[in-house]
Image (spheres, coloured by chain):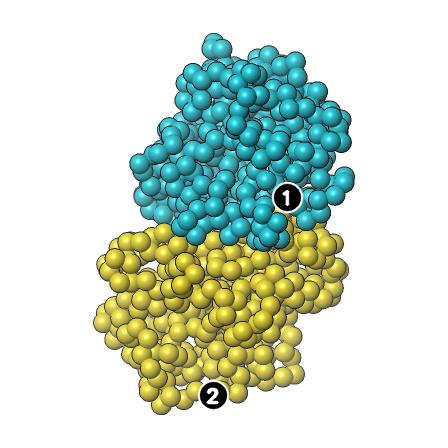
Chain colours: A yellow, B cyan
């Protein structure tokens, strides 16, 4: 029943502040996020023996972090894979524990995404999108060198095929900004956005304007995976992993043709994910949908089965992604308005909603029992988790 | 009983030729090694749905490789961690299969280690040891910028503490070169080495001379992990994973003091590894010991329990590592004389010995039933597997 019998859970979550210039190293950021997650769980560093992170650009490796925390690792790795990584790390952590390789795993992402190595640009220090995604070599000769350019091609085709509108992309941006208004930690807290603002924003890559693109953030985010049995003895309500599907690739990056170009990389894994958990999209109460761009939310809603192909634009209208909507989504502001951490902050927010951390405030999704967290990177690879506060 | 009930096995192995200038991309090398391993197992690419590799320097990522092979990945990652990676990948592959994330995993390493990015030097294209091992920042200010310099400090201290001799380091080099003489594919095949050659070789970093240091190799190596049940239906005798311990870090890199500096990174994991498998060091019939330097073999023999601390030098004398010796070791020539693949070639050779691939030739270790493969990277992190042809 479910992923590893639903015997693994997220026992704690934490993060640093989100800034544009942290003034600290990625290692220091990782230590801060780890300490925050450990305090949340009620653990000391010596009780963690697994360290998994994703490590593109500047980052802090697990052995380094373990040493800084005074912990002894039994399982540690840094992986590459960008936006599809957070869910991959959690699933791999549970698998490693099940295999007896370790017992409690800290999954994290630490980077100076604004003041250090930036993902949306080509930097003068030799780091480039192409260096970490070898397939990009095929596109750089066409002048396509940044993530925005890749996703823009898919977005424009989707608009052509299905009549998706600029205003529908804007609806995603506005909704997540409204969520950031409820989250004092969000980088865009206190900076409301109107459709007039959105439509007047500077273009980045057609059809994307400034507010279609995620933030650039210095910071770190972490979550702790352990057995449900162990988690039950800790401070927080365990949030169980009900389903997991990892790093399934579509191949749209190699074949910009129909129908592939209008599919999210999660297209192939979604049926497997829901079947594993014995759930349907309609069972999801709160979601963290990978939002490197507004458009990626819209298309994933289609490919994870919340609406038919081509209807993502209509779905995001009428406040369906709001806290009281049909599918409350990226409720801390997402990567568009809270912080960009390659998805880890979205995953953490789903955990907090399922735990009921915000009960009594204007941030809580009512009766949130099942959560979905999706990752999408590359843009040809995805991972996803179904989570539940059944612990 | 054992690692995941001994229900996971290596079902196929393969590699490219070993050269100093392949003239092919890492992706082409990865495809060749994958096809060789698939043919060995009797699988077609579409039967593989997991892709795990280690990806420092130039390399080929799993999604790229899957696309080139025409396979659809359900689990894919590239990890960093150098010489401790091969065993980590195999253990993680088995864990991921157990968790239901995928069913059959190709683990591989592909790189142009000589004509592309070299690990022993600082390259002009911006790649450096320091870039992939952040801890190196602490040492580069002291002029310590290459792996040879790190391990040399440990070796010299070991010689000081325990009387380990230059000739004992040389005994490792000579033995593995003798093994390469039996392996027509080895880079050093047909190039016998004498102690006179060894003692007269150019110094690299005291106490290491040329023949203490591993080769630099263009090439790729791969192995396929699946369930024992599945492997039994394939071409080869399955080689089961009896025990696995992954990425345990010592902390000697941060504290060059006694006793830590005279411990291999595998020191902490060895007891766990043998206990998991219900085996003792004396049960090991054939070993692949991570040989980035001659010295790393000698010290790991101590820390994996084949002799007492300080007696590694004496142990490697009297041909104990030869095919007819007490512990036949790196029997294809190792990374010192076959090829440098961050350890994957040593792991593959253990598999072949356990399968009895060389029966009837002068390469087979008699009655090889239990094998050990160790990895060591960084130099502060290790992984290891115990393998058995019990399938």
Residue at x 56%, y 84% (from the top left corner): A182
Q: Which residue is mark 2?
A: A192
Badge 2 density bin: few <14, some 14–19, many ≥20, Cα 10 Å = some
Q: CA distance from mark 2 to mark 1?
A: 49 Å
How many marks do you count on the picture? Answer: 2
- Image check: B25 left or right of A361? left
Label 1 marks a residue whose chain is: B
Against A310, residue B105 (above or below) is above
Q: Please state the chain letter of the residue tagged with numbered disc 2 in the rendered image.
A: A
The percent position of residue B277, horizontal first and vertical second, equals 67, 31
Q: Is residue B145 visible?
A: yes
Q: Could you tell me residue B28's position as x and y percent?
A: 33, 39
Q: In the rendered image, which residue does mark 1 sit on? A: B380
Q: In the image, which disc is placed on residue B104?
A: none
Q: x, y (%) of residue B384?
A: 61, 35
Same chain under badges 2 and 1? The reply is: no
At horizontal 74% and vertical 26% (from top left) the residue drawn is B163
Question: Residue A165, position in %: x, y?
Answer: 29, 79
């Amino acid at each position: 029943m479910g992923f590893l019998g639903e015997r693994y859970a997220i026992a704690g979550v934490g993060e640093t502040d989100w800034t544009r210039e942290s003034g600290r190293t990625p290692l220091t950021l990782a230590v801060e996020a780890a300490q925050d997650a450990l305090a949340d769980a009620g653990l000391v560093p010596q009780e963690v023996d697994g360290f998994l992170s994703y490590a593109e650009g500047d980052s802090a490796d697990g052995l380094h972090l373990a040493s800084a925390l005074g912990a002894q690792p039994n399982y540690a790795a840094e992986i590459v894979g960008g936006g599809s990584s957070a869910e991959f790390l959690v699933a791999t952590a549970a698998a490693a524990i099940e295999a007896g390789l370790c017992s409690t795993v800290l999954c994290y992402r630490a980077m100076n995404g604004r003041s250090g190595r930036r993902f949306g640009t080509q930097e003068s220090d030799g780091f480039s999108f192409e260096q970490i995604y070898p397939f990009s070599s095929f596109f750089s000769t066409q002048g396509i060198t940044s993530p925005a350019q890749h996703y823009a091609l898919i977005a424009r085709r989707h608009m052509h095929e299905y009549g998706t509108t600029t205003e529908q992309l804007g609806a995603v941006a506005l909704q997540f900004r409204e969520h950031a208004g409820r989250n004092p930690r969000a980088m865009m807290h206190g900076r409301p956005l109107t459709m007039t603002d959105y439509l007047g924003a500077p273009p980045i890559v057609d059809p994307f304007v400034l507010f279609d693109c995620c933030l650039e953030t210095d910071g770190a985010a972490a979550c702790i995976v352990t057995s449900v049995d162990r988690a039950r003895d800790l401070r927080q309500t365990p949030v169980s992993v009900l389903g997991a599907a990892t790093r399934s690739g579509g191949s749209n990056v190699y074949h910009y043709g129909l129908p592939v170009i209008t599919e999210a990389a999660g297209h192939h894994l979604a049926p497997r994910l829901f079947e594993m958990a014995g759930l349907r999209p309609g069972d999801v109460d709160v979601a963290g949908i990978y939002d490197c761009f507004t458009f990626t939310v819209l298309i994933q809603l289609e490919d994870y089965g919340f609406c038919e192909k081509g209807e993502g634009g209509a779905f995001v209208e009428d406040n369906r992604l709001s806290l009281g909507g049909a599918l409350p989504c990226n409720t801390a502001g997402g990567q568009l308005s809270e912080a960009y951490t390659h998805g880890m902050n979205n995953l953490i927010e789903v955990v907090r909603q399922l735990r009921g951390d915000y009960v009594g405030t204007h941030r809580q999704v009512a009766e949130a029992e099942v959560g979905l967290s999706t990752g999408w990177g590359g843009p040809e690879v995805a991972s996803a988790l179904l989570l539940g506060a059944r612990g």
